[in-house]
Image (cartoon, rainbow, N blue to C red):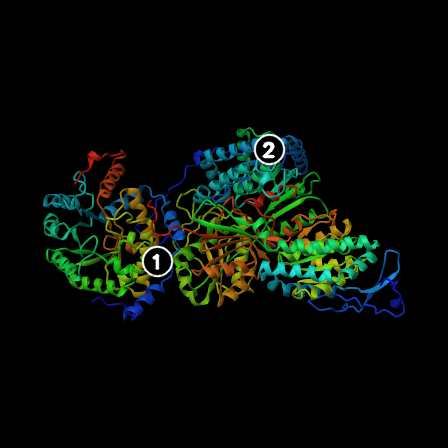
Amino acid sequence: MASASAFEYAPAPESRSVVDIAPSYGLFIDGEFTEAADGKVFKTVSPSTEEVLSEVAQAGAEDVDRAVKAARRAFEKWSALPGSERAKYLFRIARIIQERSRELAVLETLDNGKPIKETRDADLPLVAAHFFYYAGWADKLDHAGFGANPRPLGVAGQVIPWNFPLLMLAWKIAPALATGNTVVLKPAETTPLSALFFADICRQAGLPKGVVNILPGYGDAGAALVEHPDVNKVAFTGSTAVGKAIARQVAGTDKKVTLELGGKGANIVFDDAPIDQAVEGVVTGIFFNQGQVCCAGSRLLVQESIHDELLDSLKRRLSTLRLGDPLDKNTDIGAINSAEQLSRITSLVEQGEAEGAERWSPACELPSSGYWFAPTLFTNVTQAHTIARDEIFGPVLSVLTFRTPDEAVAKANNSQYGLSAGIWTEKGSRILAVASKLRAGVIWSNTFNKFDPTSPFGGYKESGFGREGGRHGLEAYLDV
Amino acid sequence: MPTTAPALGDVTASDSTLRRFLHGLPGVDTVGLEARAASLGTRSIKTTAKAYAIDLAISMVDLTTLEGADTPGKVRALGAKAVHPDPTDRTTPSTAAVCVYPDMVATAKDAVAGSGVKVASVATAFPAGRAALDVKLADVRDAVAAGADEIDMVIDRGAFLAGKYMKVYDEITAVKEACGTSARLKVIFETGELSTYDNIRRASWLGMLAGADFIKTSTGKVAVNATPANTLLMLEAVRDFRAQTGVQVGVKPAGGIRTTKDAIKFLVLVNETAGADWLDNHWFRFGASSLLNDLLMQRQKLATGRYSGPDYVTVD
Amino acid sequence: MSEKTDKTEQQRLSVFKTYKLYVGGKFPRSESGRVYEVTDSKGKWLANAPLSSRKDARDAVVAARKAFGGWSGATAYNRGQILYRVAEMLEGRRDQFVREVADAEGLSKSKAAAVVDAAIDRWVWYAGWTDKIAQVVGGGNPVAGPFFNLSTPEPTGVVTVLAPQESSFLGLVSVIAPVIATGNTVVVIASEKSPLPALSLGEVLATSDLPGGVVNVLSGKTAEIAAPLAAHQDVNAIDLAGADDVLAKELEIAAADNLKRVVRPQAVDYSRTPGIERLTAFLETKTVWHPTGALGASGSSY
């Protein structure tokens, strides 16, 4: 996609040999890899090539029961350990992740399809940082503001998505273990591998068996886990539809729930914005991880007076994005995670066109195999368009305009979701005024898509409830 | 006098219109700018792309000596190196120019005669720029008369920081006039002294409005010289200036770029910010001295597969 | 109301009070035009209370939503002043509430007085919380980068509260004060059997500088009113304090439609000083990032 130039970057692929993927993997229950009770397996493929990477055991209800029982058995000792000892296990895990980060980055890129630049520079550093952060909490819970000696809940059933497989695992497992819970975690069916490698890291760290159990599988395994009567805590990151189903499933029980769901983040650019940085922020906001990010800035709200200027800059910038082999260190845009997701994106984009929005993509050659979608933006979008309301979860930006700050806030809040928002202006008081009126859990002003283990993350409205990260993230795993 | 493009009309009609224009330029967010520069710095340039970039970088070097101790002998040696950077490999491109003080221009011209290598001269009471305008202009005329192809002037940072933009503008236009038609004008902002990115953006536009052929970061004589971020910002300025006026202006980061790795990263900045039109030594330069030898050693490594050493490049 | 033993009062026919809903700062009758009999603990008729309908619930949500912007945008200090004003107003009508609570809950005068005093003190307690909770649960986050990062609690929005069925006044105050202290607005369903203290509280709130719509009081059949509120897409949270287990489960399922924040029923001793759980249950954490960066353009080299 890069403009024709004598300076053609030669391929710079990261070496695949740093990771050794076995032909098959089991479920990780009670410290052992084991087959599924019914012997079922499924294949996990590399979305950039459709190559089969491995065959993975597929958990069913019986396996869920086995894993929950193992977690329950482990809970008594694990929760009784001095916090300082639990901390040291988590520190060990953090260190091993750092040591193996190149291997894990390549693995994640292979299984997920996202660029190595992102797994190397964003996912893996954040994963390690998350374990470091929560490790330190394990022996300081008395000081976390939840009263003296706050107790863990018990067995946590955790279901995570495919967009940041290892990072979402870290967000779930690190606070759960720090607070003394044990865990049964189900990774997404399209990205089970990094969680299985994490099982090996637990082994290297000497983590007592049963404290962490990993169950690759599909939605039915997730539902069985949520439903299991001996699960005390449910943590889910994924779609709003599934989040609602979980909320119904746990109704009338004592299970504590946190849900981190969809979004339709508004990125608001005022006429006095630092324009070059705003363009970068808009690009990061929607094209990071191919837009498969719940907090993506998928709606650009641009002040009408600078619409044309900003769009010109944005289009010029999109033309420099490099789409292709995710293992190439110069790739900006990788593959879409699955055929299913690609078809969802495609159908929403078609709907956008059918509803009269104007579609634009830079000249862009897509690889012949794998799942790919060119960076796309839609102009002439209004609040009434489906692409302005529904989460696309792909590299598709809907551009809307506003005239006044009031209108910007009204449009930004005019959504069933409330996860993230961006504000771009050089006027400090406007940032604070707009930020205070936006109904969203994370507000990035003059920046976008920044994450940190100390920073609470989570949504308003149908983007879910509960916070992950920071001191706030402990609450979800404590009986308070 | 420079012709200000019609698109910008009467921006320079008065002190107040100029001030309003410069202060109306979009602000720069420090963290965002530096993050973008750092992110482009992670591009991995290998094999054929690297070979291309190394030769391009060599051809963009303004090989510089700006010492009180400069002598004709030193300048002649520098000129010889500029023409044939690697005596063992004649396919190595020449540098773009040698850059010297005005009194060394004639010597330098002799040294590069017939090679196509330009002679650039710093002027206007370089590096401080603290002299009367007449003295500065005499400095420029001296250098031009001695045959300088390019003049690297410094702006009056004191006037700029005092908000006297018109004074800075007038000085640049006067120097531009003194350059006549034969010498291209590079305007040095001394970005390290302007201190903020907003100032650097304003200075870039001020320089371009006043007729700069190149905008240049720094003298190499202060603590902070060329950085990826300030160069990226200036590349954005020339890109936007051409979009508005149709006039293309070059960019020269100077000082602090010492390795091939760094130079290639700057070329990535050029490629992905201003674009391929600037990937030519008519539009982009490196003000450097030690950089050249590292480029040469890397070039030898690519050619032979062995790592080279300092004894295999010349010390001139 | 209870008969007076005072001789002079016996000689005159007392004036009954018509109990009305409190919605949007006004005192409407139920849109249904229906009432139901409220009796004391011995079954003696006390008054007729409005039997709220789905439409009353809908109107209350509209009023609560309308009030949300102003109330959540008021300064915490201002909200604290108003909550304290509620305590002041209640203190002045203490005798009335002692009487109503005694009737409603079958308590002796002195026990009812203790309950009312505790309820007044609860308003004072929460009045003091309005401008402190943000410091307790929010704060700066030391992110690893050149960013200022601040988490602040913000009100969830419109909250439906099923007031406790038994503790008709202290329980009621204990569940609505924390909701509004932080800037939420509330639609509260009074104790089904003993709604009168709740309806009278509306009169106190109306004279306490509390903007209309911040608290809306409905009386009637809890299950009937709660069902549309639990399913209402413009309600952000629901406190099921006054629901039994069966109703609570039904409502929690309905509440999932727009992912309301749900507080399940639990055993609470309302006479004890509460913790901050009910305050934080209806707060969202908003985290705002902004670059800091260096003072100047000293950007590092590669």
In the image, residue C243 above or below residue C203: above
Q: Amino acid at mark 1?
A: Asp
Disc 1: which chain?
Answer: B
Residue C205 locus on image (x, y percent): 70, 63
Frontmost residue, C243 versus C233:
C243
In the image, residue A228 above or below residue A420: above
Frontmost residue, A166 versus A173:
A173
Look at the numbered discs 1 and 2 and tell me whether their residues touch, using CB distance below 8 Å: no
Q: Is residue A10 visible?
A: yes
Front label number (1 vs 2): 1
Q: Dot 1 lies on which element?
A: helix
Frontmost residue, B5 versus A24:
B5
Residue C203 locus on image (x, y percent): 73, 65
Residue A14 locus on image (x, y percent): 41, 39
**Could you give the CA–CA distance between mark 1 and mark 2, rounded to whole angstroms?**
55 Å
Quarter of the image with the C terminus of chain A in it: top right
In the image, residue A367 above or below residue B199: above
Q: Say which quarter of the image contains residue C102.
A: bottom right
Residue A422 locus on image (x, y percent): 49, 56
Q: Which residue is mark 1?
A: B198
Frontmost residue, A231 versus B270:
A231
| Lateral position of residue C11 relative to residue B61, left or right | right
Dot label at residue A443? none
Q: Is residue B274 visible?
A: no
Q: Amino acid at mark 2?
A: Phe
Q: Dot 2 lies on which element?
A: strand
Q: Which residue is mark 2?
A: A28
Q: Say which quarter of the image contains residue C12.
A: bottom right
Residue neighbourhood size for the residue with mark 2, other residues' Cα within 10 Å, grouped as few (<14), some (14–19), many (≥20): many
What's the residue at 28%, 34% (across, down)? B305
Residue neighbourhood size for the residue with mark 1, other residues' Cα within 10 Å, grouped as few (<14), some (14–19), many (≥20): many
